Image (tube, rainbow, N blue to C red):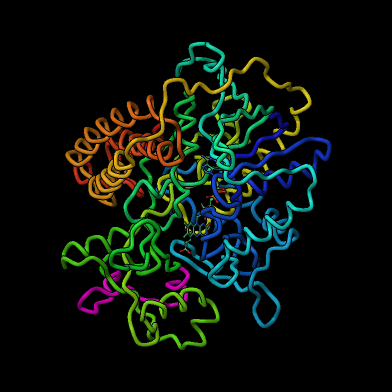
């Protein structure tokens, strides 16, 4: 199969890009691939909303820039922050024009929310299901573009480069080029090649590397692992953001339900086992301090008290007030026997967002020619050492737009690469025992949660490294002799991503933003990015 533009991922980044390219180039073909159902994305689960300066009487671009820089703890690229904040408002307007609805107040103005680290109310939202509404609007909009083809249940295995034409490709090879991808078509169970002139990677996050995460099962870091294998540049993987308040449900592992930070923005208070509003002891911004600070404070309280969670107290809300903004959370809590007007909500931190990823420039270009990246899989320089809440949906739209604008300028000068061989599956057999995959997965999640979580130290990182080495070796051996499956490929990708997180963490001899190492508790004088 050949396509002018190939888009891997059907979340906000992939769909925004595809819509824009389709509008600008009605004579070109655009193919979107997604590994499960088209709407099963991190985007769908976004709750709080999308940050953007909408009320210029109280707010300003300068304030949004400043808040982003403070959260990023010295590592944001200031020019990128300016780009995202300034251009983001246009992108939000386009999203609204494509049909996304955001809540308004009684005067007809957008009802703006507030979250940790924001100095003003600037979060547009749709109740507490903002991502679901955005995903709905975008999927609806692409239906009207006849030159877009969306193929679901199509698992991308690897990016095709000169390596597949028989050339030696290493980290120092100049001008590695992307010619398309190999995919496992889950409808036919066949491995196919899709040749593309330009490819956008929009594969989302990697929360599934950890035992407790707010991310759905698709978030296995496939894009980052593929680019690393293809010898592309990866940046700042140590900065994993743990959301402070995932709902604590004993026994629930895989995807933990999120209690949006907007609940604290509206007045929810964190309390420990003794009922103390402990955030006062940690930061003068209390419950609305940036996420790294709140998550570490909760982690500390849990360790001191020997508990598995703290509480979020919303008992001072009326049911009417709470359900007006957070109906989904209210229903979820009721379904497990928690009435938020009477009971406190048990919460604990969970892996939520990857600030690092595939290194991109200000046009969303990766280090691999004709391969772009946008959304959570990319490291644009916006978030630095810690992402400001609700900045990621904005970033995804801004860089999807920038990638599209760059790509359409050169599409007419590109041709399809000829002579790409079929996927080689000789000598592989159906897996004999799934336990070889599932047990390795459990081990990886456990070691990442216990050794490479909110608080790290050199011994823990060293242990994680050694254990990952063994898992890597065993998984590669299994991969060599086994027919590919999504489970095996995801395990392989997650082990690669876990290794990249640990490697970057080991290289960072300081504590900054989301990376806290008790052996290096101070910030180094020179802030720098780690690029692998
Ligand atoms: P995604 O939306 O995750 O889409 C990834 C796509 O890639 C999927 O279609 C998937 O199938 C596809 N894919 C991945 N690997 C492969 C493969 N191998 N082959 C084929 N397809 C593949 N951010 C905010 O700004 N505001 C919020 O309020 C907010 N709330 C959040 C709440 C939750 C619970 C979570 C989990 C995240 C939240 N975030 C929020 C973060 C934000 O939702 C994500 O960063 C953003 O949606 C990522 O979008 P994306 O387009 O990059 O990727
Ligand atoms: C939330 O709603 O708390 C999540 C917001 C985000 O991750 O940006």
Q: Position of residue 299 (x, y in %)?
A: 25, 60
Q: How many marks?
A: 0
- Left or right, 162 with respect to 316, comes to right
Q: Nearer the viewer, residue 468 or 151?
A: 151
Q: Position of residue 197 (x, y in %)?
A: 69, 27
Q: Residue at x 65, y 64 (%)?
A: 54
Q: Is residue 410 above or below residue 46?
A: above
Magenta span covers which residues? Answer: 261-280
Outermost residue, top direction?
167
Q: Residue at x 52, y 16 (%)?
A: 163
Tell whether position 267 is magenta. Answer: yes
Q: In the rendered image, is residue 367 in sight?
A: yes
- Left or right, 255 with respect to 468, comes to right
The quadrant of the picture occupied by the C terminus is top left
Q: Nearer the viewer, residue 270 or 230?
A: 230
Q: Nearer the viewer, residue 352 or 183?
A: 183
Q: Residue at x 27, y 44 (%)?
A: 439
Q: Is residue 467 above or below residue 339?
A: above
Image quadrant in which you'd find residue 242? bottom left
Q: Position of residue 70 (x, y in %)?
A: 44, 53
Q: Is residue 45 above or below residue 392?
A: below
Q: Residue at x 32, y 39 (%)?
A: 433
Q: In the rendered image, is residue 521 in sight?
A: no
- Left or right, 324 with respect to 298, comes to right
Tell whether position 482 is magenta. Answer: no
Q: Position of residue 133 (x, y in %)?
A: 62, 64
The quadrant of the picture occupied by the N terminus is top right
Image quadrant in which you'd find residue 505? top left
């Amino acid at each position: 199969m050949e396509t002018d533009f190939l888009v891997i991922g059907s979340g906000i980044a992939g769909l925004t890009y595809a819509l824009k390219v389709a509008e600008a180039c009605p004579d070109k073909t655009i193919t979107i691939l997604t590994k499960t159902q088209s709407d099963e994305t991190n985007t769908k689960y976004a709750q709080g909303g999308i940050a953007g300066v909408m009320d210029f009487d109280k707010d300003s671009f300068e304030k949004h820039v400043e808040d982003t820089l403070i959260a990023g703890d010295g590592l944001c690229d200031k020019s990128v922050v300016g780009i995202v904040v300034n251009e983001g408002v246009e992108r939000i307007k386009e999203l609204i024009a494509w049909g996304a609805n955001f809540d308004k107040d009684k005067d007809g103005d957008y009802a703006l929310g507030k979250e940790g680290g924001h100095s003003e109310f600037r979060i547009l939202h749709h109740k507490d299901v903002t991502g679901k509404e955005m995903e709905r609007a975008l999927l609806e909009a692409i239906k009207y573009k006849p030159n877009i083809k969306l193929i679901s249940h199509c698992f991308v295995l690897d990016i095709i480069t000169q390596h597949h034409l028989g050339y030696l490709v290493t980290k120092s090879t100049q001008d590695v080029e992307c010619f398309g991808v190999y995919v496992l078509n889950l409808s036919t169970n066949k491995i196919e090649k899709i040749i593309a002139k330009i490819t956008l990677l929009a594969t989302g996050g990697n929360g599934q590397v950890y035992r407790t995460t707010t991310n759905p099962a698709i978030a296995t870091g496939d894009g980052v692992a593929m680019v690393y294998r293809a010898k592309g540049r990866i940046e700042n993987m140590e900065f994993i953001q743990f959301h402070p308040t995932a709902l604590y449900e004993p026994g629930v592992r895989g995807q933990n339900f999120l209690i949006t930070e907007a609940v604290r923005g509206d007045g929810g208070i964190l309390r420990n086992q003794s009922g103390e509003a402990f955030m006062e002891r940690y930061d003068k911004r209390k419950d609305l301090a940036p996420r790294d600070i709140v998550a570490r404070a909760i982690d500390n309280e849990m360790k001191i008290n020997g508990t598995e969670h703290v509480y979020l107290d919303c008992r001072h809300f009326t049911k009417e007030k709470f359900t007006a903004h957070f109906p989904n959370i209210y229903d979820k809590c009721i379904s497990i026997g928690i009435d938020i007007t009477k009971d406190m909500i048990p919460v604990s931190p969970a892996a939520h967002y990857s600030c690092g990823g595939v290194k991109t420039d200000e046009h969303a270009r990766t280090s691999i020619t004709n391969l772009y990246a946008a959304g959570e899989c990319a490291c644009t320089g916006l978030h630095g050492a810690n992402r400001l809440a609700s900045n990621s949906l904005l970033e995804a739209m801004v860089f999807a737009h920038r990638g599209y604008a760059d790509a359409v300028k050169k599409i007419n000068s590109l041709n399809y690469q000829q002579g790409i061989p079929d996927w080689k599956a000789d000598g592989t057999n159906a897996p004999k025992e799934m336990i070889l995959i599932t047990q390795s997965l459990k081990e990886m999640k456990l070691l990442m949660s216990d050794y490479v979580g909110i608080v790290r130290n050199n011994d823990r990182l060293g242990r994680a490294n050694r254990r990952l080495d063994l898992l890597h070796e065993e998984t590669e051996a299994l991969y060599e002799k086994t027919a590919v499956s999504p489970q095996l490929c995801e395990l392989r990708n997650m082990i690669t991503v876990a290794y990249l997180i640990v490697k970057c963490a080991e290289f960072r001899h300081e504590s900054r933003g989301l990376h806290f190492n008790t052996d290096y508790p101070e910030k180094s004088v020179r802030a720098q990015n780690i690029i692998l």
